[in-house]
Image (spheres, rainbow, N blue to C red):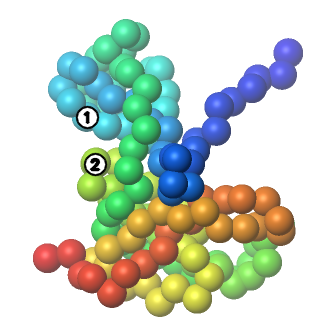
């Protein structure tokens, strides 16, 4: 039996990406990626975890430039971004990005060999 997984991101009515996550009604934490095992903060599970689309704005915590990869053209840069909603997400940065820790980031829809993909674009604004 093939397991069908829902997409990790969707676009809203304006075409902006939103991450598919879950919200814990026990403690208020937002979690990404979506899962059913339990809240990482308080342990609540089952009906206490509700699907929620998360905004993609956040702050760059770390980044790394990838120079060797089996299936993607190199170089490209990955970043860990702490979303304003709480979760930390690792994703590619938009091509040409000049990352620095503390920069603000927001999700955008990029293209990877013709397929749409989620990635982060950076602003010059630094989180204080």
Q: Which residue does the numbered mark 2 point to in the structure image?
A: 86
The answer to whether residue 52 is above or below residue 56 is above
The quadrant the N terminus occupies is top right
Mark 2–mark 1 Cα distance, whole angstroms, equals: 7 Å
The answer to whether residue 84 is above or below residue 120 is above
The quadrant the C terminus occupies is bottom left
Q: At numbered mark 2, what does the secondary structure look like: helix, strand or loop?
A: loop
> Mark 1 or mark 2, which is nearer the start of the sequence?
1
Residue at 43% in and 84% down: 99
Residue at 72% in and 68% down: 111
Q: Give residue 70's position: percent from left, percent from top.
A: 82, 68
Residue at 52% in and 85% down: 97
Q: At numbered mark 1, what does the secondary structure look like: helix, strand or loop?
A: loop
- Occupied quadrant, residue 101: bottom left
Q: Marks 1 and 2: in contact by CB < 8 Å?
A: yes
Q: Residue furthest left?
A: 128
- Return the residue nearer the eye: 4 or 80: 4
The answer to whether residue 16 is above or below residue 64 is above
Q: Residue furthest front?
A: 13
Q: Which residue does the numbered mark 1 point to in the structure image?
A: 29
Circle 1 packing at 10 Å, graded few (<14), some (14-19), many (20+), is some
- Return the residue nearer the eye: 60 or 70: 60
Q: Give residue 76's position: percent from left, percent from top.
A: 65, 79
Q: Residue furthest top?
A: 47
Q: How many numbered marks appear? A: 2
Circle 2 packing at 10 Å, graded few (<14), some (14-19), many (20+), is some
Q: Give residue 81's position: percent from left, percent from top.
A: 39, 63
Compared across the picture, whether 5 is left or right of 24 comes to: right
């Amino acid at each position: 039996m093939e397991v069908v997984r829902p997409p990790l991101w969707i676009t809203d009515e304006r075409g902006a990406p939103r991450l598919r996550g879950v919200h814990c009604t026990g403690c208020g934490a937002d979690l990404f990626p979506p899962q059913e095992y339990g809240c990482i903060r308080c342990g609540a599970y089952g009906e206490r975890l509700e699907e929620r689309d998360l905004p993609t704005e956040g702050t760059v915590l770390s980044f790394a430039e990838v120079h060797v990869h089996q299936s993607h053209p190199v170089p490209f840069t990955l970043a860990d971004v702490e979303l304003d909603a709480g979760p930390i997400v690792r994703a590619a940065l938009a091509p040409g990005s000049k990352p620095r820790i503390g920069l603000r980031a927001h999700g955008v829809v990029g293209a990877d060999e013709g397929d749409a993909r989620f990635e982060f674009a950076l602003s010059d604004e630094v989180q204080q």
